[in-house]
Amino acid sequence: MKLVIISGRSGSGKSTGLHVLEDQGFFCIDNLPLVLLPDLAKELQRAYLDRVAVSIDARNIRQELSRFPEIINRIKQQHVDAEVIYLDADDEELLKRFSETRRKHPLSTQNCSLAEALKAEQQVLEPISNLADLTMDTTGLTLHDLRDIFNKRVACKQDKSIALLFESFGFKKGAPNDADYIFDVRCLPNPYWVNHLRQYTGKDQPIKEFLMAEPQVDVMFEDIYKFVEKWLPSFEACNRSYLTVAIGCTGGHHRSVYLAERLASSFQAKYRNVQVRHRELP
């Protein structure tokens, strides 16, 4: 049985993720008391349910959440293929989402502000976030973006092989918080400074031709490719389910996009589950 455990701070997109899995045929349970998880896994195995997803949040008893490492270990000993997905966003984004929906945070009280509740929630969920197979930073994502990413990375993952994501981004908007490796390619020649190329992206042929003509770009590509190729088997041997490799340039439109596309294409020849995402492109 495949069991996906979704957790994260309130407002980070847990419900959206659970709905995506439900649409893909998962048997889904929202806000499950953590103490019930091992027995639930046994019962669902007896019912021959092969794909299950549960959402666990800070409304659980704090002492039970602290036992999450012990509980997840018990579940895996029951021959359950369990994955932990943790969603989060920066405090400013979460505050904005709550102000827009006017929802009440589950930990906020008359004596505890929303900002304080978000900080407390982060601490309460730390035993889960520390064991996450995949951490997703949903800051700046639209509902459509989140559904699309969750669907591709989690819902449509068909087997136990590692899911490899190459993500381009622009440093001027900050580095992604959920990347396992970040490569800085700002040292490469920048098509942005060629006026007639500025309008294109790294997916367009004029940019590809410009960068393919630069020897440094090939060297950078080979170095990143060889590094990932060398260490990917070690991640798989440690039963890692996800690996995110982020490639950053200044604006996230040209060099990083080109290299992320090229790397994804090269690894798709060897691995089943390889995706590419461009954070700064529409």
Image (cartoon, rainbow, N blue to C red):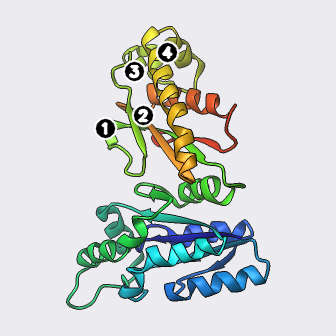
Q: CA distance from mark 2 to mark 1?
A: 8 Å
Q: Position of residue 259 (x, y in %)?
A: 51, 27
Characterize the local packing of mark 2: few (<14), some (14-19) or many (20 or more) Cα atoms within 10 angstroms.
many
Q: Label 4 is placed on what type of residue?
A: Asp
Residue 188 in the figure: left or right of residue 25: left
The residue mark sitting in front, 2 or 4, is: 4
The residue mark sitting in front, 4 or 3, is: 4
Q: Which residue is mark 2?
A: 252
Q: CA distance from mark 1 to mark 3?
A: 14 Å
The residue mark sitting in front, 3 or 2, is: 2
Which image quarter: residue 30? Answer: bottom right
Q: CA distance from mark 2 to mark 4?
A: 18 Å
Q: Between residues 42 and 119, which one lies in front from this camera angle?
A: 42
The residue mark sitting in front, 1 or 3, is: 1
Q: Position of residue 58 (x, y in %)?
A: 40, 81
Characterize the local packing of mark 3: few (<14), some (14-19) or many (20 or more) Cα atoms within 10 angstroms.
some
Q: CA distance from mark 3 to mark 2?
A: 11 Å
Residue 47 in the figure: left or right of residue 107: right
Characterize the local packing of mark 1: few (<14), some (14-19) or many (20 or more) Cα atoms within 10 angstroms.
few
Tell me the number on the disc at residue 172: 1
Is the residue 221 above or below the residue 123 in the image? above
Instruction: Give the mark nearer the N terminus: 2 vs 1.
Output: 1
Q: Which residue is mark 3?
A: 192
Q: Position of residue 29 (x, y in %)?
A: 62, 81
Q: Are marks 4 and 3 in contact (CB under 8 Å)?
A: no
Q: Are marks 1 and 4 in contact (CB under 8 Å)?
A: no
Q: Residue furthest bottom?
A: 110
Q: Which residue is mark 4?
A: 218
Is the residue 282 above or below the residue 249 in the image? below
